[in-house]
Amino acid sequence: MAETTTDQFDVVILGGGSGGYAAALRGAQLGLTIAMVEKDKLGGTCLHRGCVPTKAMLHVGEVADAPSEGKDLGLDISLNAVDIEKVLGFKDKVIGRLYKGLQGLVKSRDVEYVEGFGRLTGKNQVTVETGDGERVLTGKNIVLATGSFSKTLPGIELGGRILDSEAALQLPEVPKNPIILGGGVIGVEFASVWKSLGAESVTIVEGLPHLVANEDESLSKALERSFKKRGIKFSLGVFTEKVEPSDSGVKVTLADGTVFEGDYLLVAVGRGPVTKDLGYEEQGIEMDRGFVLANKGTLETSVPGIYAVGDIVPGLQLAHRGFQQGIFVAELIAGQNPAPIVESGIPRITYCEPQLGSVGLTEKQAKEQLGEDAVQTYEYNLGGNGKSQILGTTGFIKLVREKDGPIVGVHMVGSRMSELMGEAQLIVNWEAYPEDVASLVHGHPTQHEAMGEAALALAGKPLHAHA
């Protein structure tokens, strides 16, 4: 008969994804006794089915685009074929290396790693179904970090020719004419990689007025222009009414009667919180549509001693947000005084081609918060940046500042813009003035110079830019 064992810890963490393992590693570093429960693989969605594999695929797409760019540079190179089996192997190899390293880290930090399905069964208790029986973990503090899942829409059943992002990452062929339902981050990234790998036609269906509708409108419009040039089609502002799959493809009918047909449909309409049947509500935790409501300043739930981090907390569903929240909670529990995480200060990156990067307030948000006449903006076109010309990219960096005050938002579009997000988030989070950034020396020739030039212009002394 299976045995039940009970163990006591300073912190019991339910979930081993970005938020969970960050809390575990930092907590152990601070001398807390830690137990972490994970029913799947350490690293969660981000490492195994999300951020890392999609970016690996996007890198393959970037290399696949190189031959066509080479012609303009005097290079006679060509893309003869795409071996999707090797592409998937490359992706899995990257995941495998990171997974092995993470397992080693957790083991070295003296974290009690418990494999099995865990539920919250008390205000300080998690019960885990393991292969050896039931294990009850009691914690002075509990951290909920159970992550998210790919959502679909009512009437659209996943399976066969209808994929979620996880199934799309395992697809043993490059789709010929896929339809993508949803023009957010996941949708535009898959559109980009499939087009680069040789899809004949890619169509995005988005019910909102723009692609990546949560970004500054200037970025959305710039991406739409670039996608048109790349031959990526999209329908905006009309919602989907009906999806009809067959053995060979999928037919999508919109509310206005427009019909699209493709060989696959990727449903990329966002991610939902993994909280169902985990005992959260039974223990008195306040919820909203499956999300755990946590104090914005402390990330503590309505039940004292129980914290929540990552995708189950309303807000940006980003791995690095969950990671930082995990560190924050561990430090708070250990008696430190960490600075609260400001949501608007979290960098947001979309890795399609061209890449989008943003942090802080959009122009619209800034005007709503500060007033129409209290906001100044400047867009620096990458046409004036030497390194961007070498790379053959178009785009811009847009700075949003409070009038006579600090920069409150940075928004970028262009190749490799993700690499500029480090400086962008420091500018916003340290409340730098344009004059502060303008006085810094940016290496030449780099794309970072574009950030300096934008700041120079907003400070009233444009050099490689028109006033």
Image: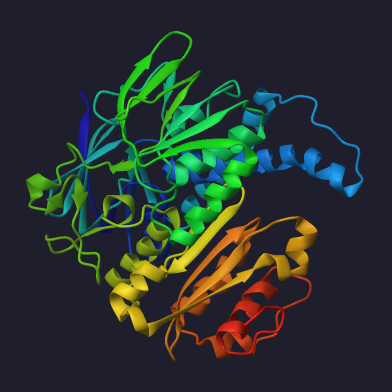
> Which residue sits at x=38%, y=14%?
245
**Residue 96 makes an appearance in the image:** no
- On-image quarter of the C terminus: bottom right
> Which residue sits at x=61%, y=67%?
420
Which quadrant of the figure has residue 193?
top right
Relative vertical location of residue 179 with respect to residue 75 in this rendering, above or below: above
**Residue 170 makes an appearance in the image:** yes
Front residue of 295/372: it is 372
- On-image quarter of the N terminus: top left
Instruction: Tell me residue 346's x, y (percent).
Output: 42, 66
Relative vertical location of residue 352 with respect to residue 194 in this rendering, above or below: below
> Which residue sits at x=29%, y=29%?
255
> Which residue sits at x=43%, y=42%?
183
Instruction: Tell me residue 174's x, y (percent).
Output: 60, 24
Q: Residue furthest top?
A: 247
Instruction: Tell me residue 373's x, y (percent).
Output: 36, 83
Which quadrant of the figure has residue 149?
top left
Front residue of 362/101: it is 362
In the drawing, does residue 457 fall left or right of residue 386?
A: left
Front residue of 175/179: it is 179
Relative vertical location of residue 109 with respect to residue 246 in this rendering, above or below: below
